[in-house]
Image (spheres, helix red, strand yellow):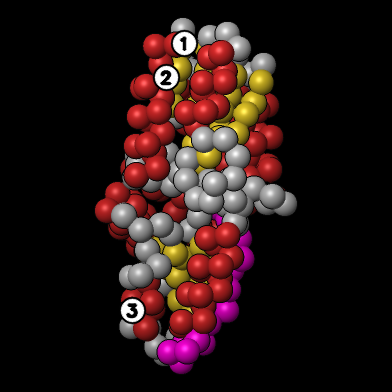
Amino acid sequence: MVDALVIAGCLSGEKNDAGIAALVEELAEAVDADVTLRARTGGRPVGQSLPEVLAGLRSRGVRRVLVTTTHVADGRLQRGAASAVRAAAPGFESLRLAPPLLATEKDLELVARALDAALPARPGRVTGLAGHRGAECGKAFAGLELALRRRGRDDLLVDAPDRLPARLREHSEHAVLLGPFLMALGHHARHDVLGNLRDELARGGVRVTTWPHSLTELPEVRHLVVSHALCQLGTVPN
């Protein structure tokens, strides 16, 4: 189908990250490329950047490449990946980029269903999931919350870490379950969400416990990423 599959995203969470490991395995099996590589698009400077990986493939004579990302929304990092792909495209016979996780209304509904199952409602509890900042992420989160409301889940909030605490405090009579809305359980999830954000809420008197998991631990999320990749190849996913 393609000579090379490149899985691009923040690599900081990939060491001993069961969700990312499962996603890499499932993508590699579904796409069936001759080689599967990973590339960095943001976060800490760990591993090669996407332009570096594409340049290396071009220098080796690789002709057909599919790039898929671990980005949640069509924000700064996804736009950066698209720019890198456009710049490198003249050196390849085929170079394609799969969309981010929340690319369509159908994607929002599928992820809402996965969250509904993974984080069932509990009396006296509100759940808050913190993702990345940015206007595009905010728009995607708002759409996801609408999809959750349609499932009767007004107790599940998804927002940027600078906006989420105030919204959770509006439910001061409830206990809070706090988790990351991130594809990897890496530095950002562990340090910024499960550490700093949890401590901020606790200092404000919120009764908070944590949900230390990544989105890629949910099989439905991994299936959606694989589906996006296969659609770029003109293949109907199972």
Q: Are marks 1 and 3 in contact (CB under 8 Å)?
A: no
**Can you say which quadrant of the picture contains the N terminus?**
top right
Contact flag, marks 1 and 2 (Cβ < 8 Å): yes
| Visible residue check, residue 121 | no
* Of pointers 2 and 3, the one earlier in the residue sequence: 2
Q: Mark 3 points at which residue?
A: 166
**As displayed, is residue 180 above or below residue 101?**
below
x, y percent for residue 17 = 68, 51
Q: Which of the two discs, 1 and 3, sits closer to the camera?
A: 1
Q: As shown in the figure, which amino acid type bears the numbered disc 1?
A: Phe
Is 171 magenta? The answer is no
Q: Using the image, tell me which numbered label, if any, was put on residue 47.
A: none
Judging from the image, what secondary structure is the residue with disc 2 in? helix
Q: For the magenta stretch, what is the residue range?
A: 202-215
> Where residue 99 sits: x, y (%)?
41, 33
Residue 128 percent location from the top left of the image: 45, 70
Amino acid type of the residue that numbered disc 3 sits on in the rendered structure:
Ala
Q: Please tell me which residue is depicted at 56% across the width and 67% down the height of the picture.
A: 191
Q: Is residue 101 left or right of residue 104?
A: right
Q: Which residue is drawn at 39% across and 11% down?
A: 90
Q: What residue did someone put label 1 on?
A: 92
* Residue 212 covered by magenta stretch: yes
Q: Reading the chain from its start, which is encountered first: label 1 or label 3?
A: 1
Residue 20 sits in quarter? top right
Residue ID for mark 2: 88
Q: Distance between the residues labelled 1 and 3?
A: 48 Å
In the rendered view of the protein, which quadrant contains the C terminus? top right
Report how far apart the C-alphas of labels 2 and 3 lie in the structure: 43 Å
Measuring from the top left, give residue 184's x and y in whole percent: 57, 52
